[in-house]
Image (tube, rainbow, N blue to C red):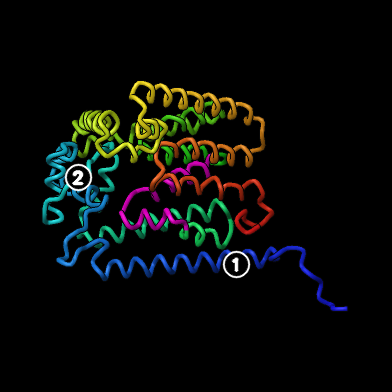
């Protein structure tokens, strides 16, 4: 009779963790190799003439250039912003890359624009990816968590376009990570998320319903102070310009499908793409939004008596899921990764959930 006992599972616990780590490492290596090849073949960042490719990052860098010239208001003018982008890439192009961000994001854009385009693009990708991976690792408290985070397909998508999804996901994760033990810091971080105002609806509701009033107040003060400081530096008119630009952009994209209904990642966009009239689509979207808000409020009230770890994890899961309904291409996948890793908080003595 063999002395080796048969395994009851396909992989032992340790084998599974090692397997996940090896697979994630291979995927990350493939991503890195792909990006290098794309860069060398002039498909990523710069073209064969050394000019910037038309990607989302062009809008950040161009708006930052305008801000450094003292013309931050021009970034909110679609024609002037487009002209700045065309000047940056050295030729005209079809489509639009609007600047519809609050004044706060000018701090990031101006810092990036102070560097050469390619350098700024690479630094932006490395910094946001590192922040994202570190946040996941802190939440999961597992050695392979950062590698698994980097292996997410959405991470590659964000790096290719230079989008800010990794930054958004990091701010969400950090605010939830500090919510229980350092509520003021959590609120300060959450206030910085105001650069993505669509996230400023369900988060306050969830914090209030869960009784996280310190974080609620600090988040409000952080959002007001950071945007107020940015407006004082880049021009007080940037606040009004942002609100006006947001109205125009919403009218273009939502009312008139400026980017196509298929790019409106919401129930409204799905219904319009399916042929529903605007009134019916808006009614269904409103019903869905109110239902989510009521459900979230009710769940948070019932969870106030839960343990701290369980409460924080559930908050991460519900808020991230609900917020992701407004953005499913680049931001949401990285945000949705947060509640998965937050499950590690519930079971601190076990292996990471992806290693089971």
Q: Which residue in the structure is indicated by mark 1?
A: 19
Q: Is residue 236 visible?
A: no
Q: Residue furthest front?
A: 275
Count of numbered circles on the image: 2
Which image quadrant: the C terminus?
bottom right
- Numbered label attached to residue 269: none
Cα–Cα gap, marks 1 and 2: 44 Å
- Numbered label attached to residue 95: 2
Q: Residues within 10 Å of mark 1 (few under 14, many from 20)?
A: some
For numbered disc 1, what is the local secondary structure? helix
Residue at figure coordinates x 35%, y 37% from the top left: 264
Residues rendered magenta in the picture: 152-179
Query: Left of 27 or right of it: where is 315?
Result: right
- Residue 340 position within the rendered picture, expressed as x and y whole percent measured from the top left: 56, 48
Q: Nearer the viewer, residue 205 or 10?
A: 10
- Residue 270 position within the rendered picture, expressed as x and y whole percent measured from the top left: 39, 34
Residue at figure coordinates x 27%, y 34% from the top left: 257
Q: Is residue 107 magenta?
A: no
State whether residue 316 is above or below residue 137: above
Query: Left of 213 or right of it: where is 331?
Result: left
């Amino acid at each position: 009779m063999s002395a080796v006992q048969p395994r009851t599972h396909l992989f032992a616990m340790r084998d599974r963790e090692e397997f996940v780590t090896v697979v994630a490492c291979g995927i990350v290596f493939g991503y890195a190799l792909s990006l290098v090849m794309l860069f060398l073949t002039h498909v990523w960042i710069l073209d064969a003439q050394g000019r910037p490719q038309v990607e989302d990052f062009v809008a950040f860098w161009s708006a930052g250039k305008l801000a450094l010239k003292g013309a931050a208001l021009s970034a909110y003018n679609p024609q002037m912003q487009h002209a700045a982008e065309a000047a940056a890439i050295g030729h005209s192009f079809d489509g639009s890359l609007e600047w519809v961000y609050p004044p706060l994001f000018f701090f990031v854009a101006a810092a990036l624009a102070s560097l050469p385009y390619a350098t700024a693009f690479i630094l932006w990708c490395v910094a946001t990816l590192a922040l994202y991976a570190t946040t996941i690792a802190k939440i999961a408290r597992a050695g392979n968590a950062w590698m698994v985070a980097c292996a997410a397909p959405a991470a590659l998508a964000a790096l290719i376009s230079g989008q800010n999804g990794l930054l958004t996901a990091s701010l969400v994760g950090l605010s939830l990570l500090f919510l229980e033990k350092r509520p003021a810091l959590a609120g300060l971080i959450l206030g910085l998320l105001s650069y993505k105002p669509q996230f400023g609806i369900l988060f306050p509701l969830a914090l209030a319903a869960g009784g996280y009033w310190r974080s609620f107040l600090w988040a409000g003060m952080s959002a007001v102070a950071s945007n107020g400081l940015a407006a004082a530096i880049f021009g007080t008119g940037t606040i009004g310009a942002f609100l006006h630009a947001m109205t125009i952009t919403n009218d273009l994209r939502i009312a008139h499908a400026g980017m196509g209904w298929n790019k409106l990642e919401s129930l409204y966009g799905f219904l319009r793409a399916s042929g529903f009239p605007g009134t019916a689509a808006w009614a269904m979207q409103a019903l869905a939004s109110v239902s989510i808000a009521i459900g979230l409020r009710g769940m948070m009230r019932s969870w106030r008596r839960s343990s701290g770890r369980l409460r924080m994890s559930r908050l991460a899961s519900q808020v991230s899921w609900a917020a992701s309904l407004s953005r499913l291409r680049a931001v949401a996948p990285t945000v949705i990764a947060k509640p998965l890793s937050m499950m590690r908080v519930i079971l601190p003595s076990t292996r990471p959930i992806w290693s089971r």
